Amino acid sequence: MIDKSVLPPYARALDMDIVDEIDGAPVIGMPFADRVQGRPGFLHGGAISGLLEIAAIAAIHQALRAKGSDSNIKQVNVTVDFMRGGLNQMTYAVGEVTRLGRTMANVEARAWQEDRDKPIAMGYMHYLIKAKRAG
């Protein structure tokens, strides 16, 4: 299973956890709770966006570790497309690294609830890869 240390404090604050993996990428689960609710009975768009971002970060760290790298990443830009409202139930997300270059990574993240083929949102993110400084 994937190392849960890739999850930042924000993910833990929203009770996100690594619940599975798909093609080596961590699947992040987020339970419905008051802290992620927007309008009654629905997920807040910010919580969905945060879940997509955490899935993307976890996927990049996994891909970098597979290459033997412990480089830092810095988000350059994000686009989120909302497809349907997130309901009062468990929500999942996974990131797919579509390009991992020397200095840039592109990630596509998908969030869903009951059916992975019916996403509630998609995120497209670009990250700068920066080698850690010695010392």
Image: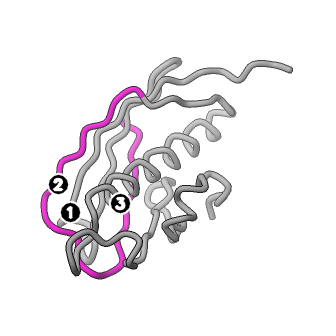
Which residue in the protein does label 2 denote? 82
Mark 3, other Cα within 10 Å: few <14 / some 14–19 / many ≥20? some
**Which residue occupies 57% across, 45% down?**
62
Residue 120 bears which disc, if any? Answer: 1
Q: Is residue 20 above or below residue 55?
A: below
Q: Is residue 106 above or below residue 47?
A: above
Is there a contact, CB below 8 Å, between mark 1 and mark 2? yes
Residue at the extreme right: 135
Which residue in the protein does label 3 denote? 47
Judging depth in this view, the residue of 77 and 3 nearest the camera is: 77
Quadrant (top left, top right, bottom left, bottom right) of the N terminus = bottom right
Q: Is residue 86 magenta?
A: yes
Label 3: state its secondary structure.
helix
Mark 2 or mark 3: whose residue is earlier in sequence: 3
**Which residue occupies 13% across, 64% down?**
84
Mark 1 or mark 2: whose residue is earlier in sequence: 2
Q: Amino acid at mark 3?
A: Ala
* CA–CA distance in space, label 3 to label 1: 12 Å
**Which residue occupies 31% across, 81% down?**
89
Q: Amino acid at mark 2?
A: Phe
Q: Quadrant of residue 39?
A: bottom left
Q: Which residues are magenta?
A: 76-98
